[in-house]
Image (cartoon, rainbow, N blue to C red):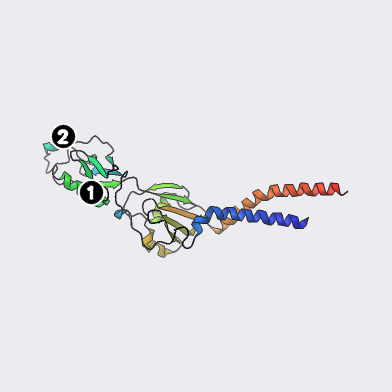
Amino acid sequence: MRYLILVFLFAALLSASCSYKQDQYLFEQKGAIAGIKPADSVTNIANYHIRPQDILQITNVQNNRSIIDQQAGVTGGQSNPQNSQLITENSNNTYTVDDDGTIGLPAIGRIPIAGLTRIEARKKIEDLYSKELKHPLLEVKITNLKVTVAGEVKVPGNVLLIKDHTTLIEIIGEAGGLTDKADEKTVKIIRTNQHSKVDQFDLSNINTLSDPRIYVQNDDIVYVLQNKKAVRNTNLQNFSLIAQPVLLIINAALIIYTLAHR
């Protein structure tokens, strides 16, 4: 009977350990598996090419309200009367790229924009508006780019990319930082736009800050694994949940066995 108890306990512990490993399997790979392999190099948001369904925010820096406004053509205290009729009704200054790769802009109409970087798009739009305005000064942002943060961070979820160069450290900061269960030596970025490559970083190593791969890209997944202490605690909790009913069954069996052999 003692041997039977030991077998049950060993099986329960093994089951708890396997449960954790199955949950972490994707993120524990050191090399290539199912098409996932370490990345050699990455690009950043500055090189991102606009796609259909992207959302562009286009602001006239000269008045910070709309693309074209009554004050857009002010030069030396004089306003251009031709500009007074070029007022956009889009209060948010946001424009969605259609499936055909174009956006519709006030006073210009539809223009092809897909395939351009943010900077290329800004220059193109400024050139088009220069026919109506004197020295247009515009700001173009792509507002729907994001990174998904999961694992041992305080606020997991999606983090919007609001600038061209955003690092892994900044993304983790936006997610509230690491939890006390986090393994700062095993932080991974899954590059879904680069054939599902995985980059792994050791945030306890100062040299990581100079690693060019630390810049995140649109649709990246940042995953922070648990540290060894947290893993052990998780295994113990799983073991406890499984062992308790097993021990109750064994205890009941021992009582029945004892009563039957009196």
Q: Nearer the viewer, residue 137 or 145?
A: 145
**Residue to which mark 1 is pinned:** 122
Q: Residues within 10 Å of mark 1 (few under 14, many from 20)?
A: some
Position of 160 relative to 86 (above/below): below
Q: Residues within 10 Å of mark 2 (few under 14, many from 20)?
A: few
Amino acid type, mark 1: Arg
What percent of the width, then of the height, locates residue 137? 19, 46
Position of 187 relative to 251 (above/below): below
**Residue to which mark 2 is pinned:** 85
Is residue 14 toward the left or the right of residue 91 in the image? right
Tell me, yes or no, if residue 60 can be seen here: no
Q: Which mark is residue 24?
A: none
Is residue 236 toward the left or the right of residue 223 in the image? right
Say which residue appears at 65% left-offset and 50% top-offset.
240
Do tag 1 and tag 2 residues touch (Cβ < 8 Å)?
A: no
Is residue 205 toward the left or the right of residue 63 in the image? right
Q: Quadrant of the N terminus?
A: bottom right
Tell me, yes or no, if residue 220 can be seen here: yes
Say which residue appears at 40% left-offset and 48% top-offset.
159
Gap in angstroms between the C-alphas marked 1 and 2: 22 Å
Q: Nearer the viewer, residue 255 or 102?
A: 102
Among numbered discs 1 and 2, the one appearing first in the sequence: 2
Say which residue appears at 48% left-offset and 55% top-offset.
224
